[in-house]
Amino acid sequence: MKTCVTSVIFLLVGLGVGFYIGYRDYQKHIASEAIQQMVESGESPEALLASMSARTISLIDSGQGQQAVQMLSFPIAHYYYLYASSTFTNEQRLKLRALIDGLASTNQIVAAQIAKEMSDKKK
């Protein structure tokens, strides 16, 4: 009987230790996955910017300036729609909005893309 009780106690202690170690390893795994996702999400906009910049440079090098301007007008128009017309405008946004307004007044591609972005988002 003593052997049976001792065996059950050691079995319960072993299960407790096993669950504790397993839980701790699972938490480490979850934390490392969260950190990895955070790093990847931070890399995503930078990867997009690098890709777009490389494509734009190749367009400029091949003499396709209009296509390069067209490609660069998308993020300008998107920023203009999201931030420049926001009610929470600060001095930096006002300066950038003035810069974009000046560019749009001299460049028809940028002006058309801003107008398209504004009309697409209001629908």
Image (tube, helix red, strand yellow):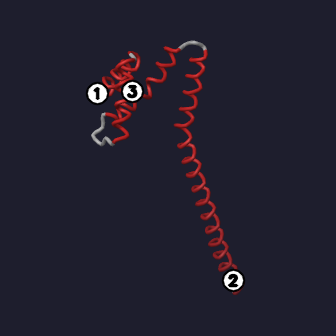
Quadrant where the N terminus is found in the figure: bottom right
Amino acid residing under circle 2: Thr
Query: Circle 2 is placed at which residue position?
Result: 6
The residue closer to the viewer here, 14 or 59, is: 59
Q: Residue at x 56, y 47 (%)?
A: 37
Mark 1 or 2, nearer chain start: 2
**Where is residue 45 shown, x and y percent of the image?**
52, 37
When asked about the image quadrant of residue 84, the answer is top left
Q: CA distance from mark 1 to mark 2?
A: 74 Å
Secondary structure, mark 3, is: helix
**Where is residue 44 shown, x and y percent of the image?**
54, 38
Q: CA distance from mark 1 to mark 3?
A: 14 Å
**Where is residue 102 shown, x and y percent of the image?**
36, 24
Query: Circle 3 is placed at which residue position?
Result: 77
- Compared to 17, does 52 lie above or below? above
Mark 1 or 3, nearer chain start: 3
Amino acid residing under circle 1: Lys
Residue 122: mark in rendering: 1
- In the visual, does 6 lie left or right of 107? right
Amino acid residing under circle 3: Ala
**Where is residue 47 shown, x and y percent of the image?**
57, 35
Q: Residue furthest bottom?
A: 2
